[in-house]
Amino acid sequence: MRSRAPRYGAALLLAALTLVAPGCASVGDWFAFGPDWVAVDTRTGESVTLEQMADELASADVVFLGELHDSPVGHALQADLLALLGERRPEVVLSLEMFERDVQAELDRYLAGELSEDAFLENARPWPRYASDYRPAVEWAREHGRPVLAANVPRPLAKRVATDGLAAVSNETHVPLFVDHSDGEYRTRFDATMAGHGSIDDGAMARYFAAQCLKDEVMAQSIAASLQRDHRGALVVHLCGNFHSDFGLGTVERLERRAGKFERRIVSMRRGPRDARPLSNQDRASADYLWLVRR
């Protein structure tokens, strides 16, 4: 199957949270499959095409596409991979961190043709670069009659947790009865990441982490409902910031607790080096595939 370059169409501290292919490309060979990216299978260390990725990913139950929120190249890759997966599986569900549960009805009405796009966007609180970054994926789902999950917790609730703690939202709709915010590897990685944003006292750090975990828990709950009840047998493709899915932590580990046994794959995005070099052990452990995109 012919390789193709990605199509190019048209927030908050917490939200943002070698290689030799058969015959050729290294990490530094940026023009192997597209002008600005290379995809790597971390288990083999080989660069792969989007079609090769789709062939393998299509057999999973859930594919996590962990993104860099500010990478236009990455968003184009996501839209292309989604379309390729749709060609290989009769049912695909698109799940998005970028829309929140309380706008699911508006999203469903838009997909069904009952709302204009302007009316939908007026009520759905889209992310600032929705038109360029996420609209292509949503429009693909709309064109092909595929469901889209508004998977995330409403932002005001996460913000309240960051300010006042989990107890402040314990009786709110869209908040699960249990939110795992225990210490462990995820907390360690979260603290290390947040340390780059300046000095934060222990109480504030705990609340910020609880807000992060609330998002993970709600996204996991949304995906689990799709797997177990609403769209059984479908492939769920979940778009999220890479911190939510890297290393099988965050949303992934909470989904595993909720959904039991299922096949999942993780794709993560990095700003890649300009020179060829081996993958680090951290890179290999973080995901099944890496998209290295030009800085």
Image (spheres, rainbow, N blue to C red):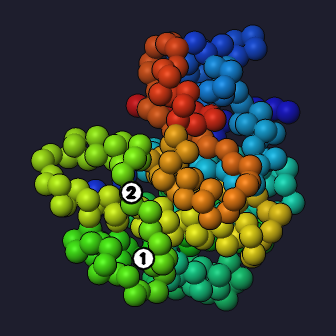
Residue 256, percent across and down? Answer: 62, 56
Residue 110, percent across and down? Answer: 63, 81
Which of the numbered marks, if any, corresponds to residue 124? none
Inspect the image, locate mark 1, and give the three-letter code of the amino acid beneath it: Pro
Residue beneath the point at 67% across and 89% down: 114
Inspect the image, locate mark 2, and give the three-letter code of the amino acid beneath it: Ser
Is any atom of residue 168 visible in this view? Answer: yes
Is 104 displayed left or right of 200 in the figure? right
Please identify the quadrant where the N terminus is shown: top right
Spatial CA distance of label 1 from label 2 is 22 Å
Residue 51, percent across and down? Answer: 77, 37
For mark 1, does the 10 Å Cα neighbourhood hold few (<14), some (14 to 19), or many (20 or more) residues?
many
Which of the numbered marks, if any, corresponds to residue 154? 1
Residue beneath the point at 79% across and 38% down: 56
Circle 2 SS class: loop
Residue 25, percent across and down? Answer: 65, 15
Residue beneath the point at 26% across and 68% down: 162
Which of the numbered marks, if any, corresponds to residue 182? 2
Is any atom of residue 215 visible in this view? Answer: no
Residue beneath the point at 57% across and 81% down: 104
- Quarter of the view holding residue 233: bottom right
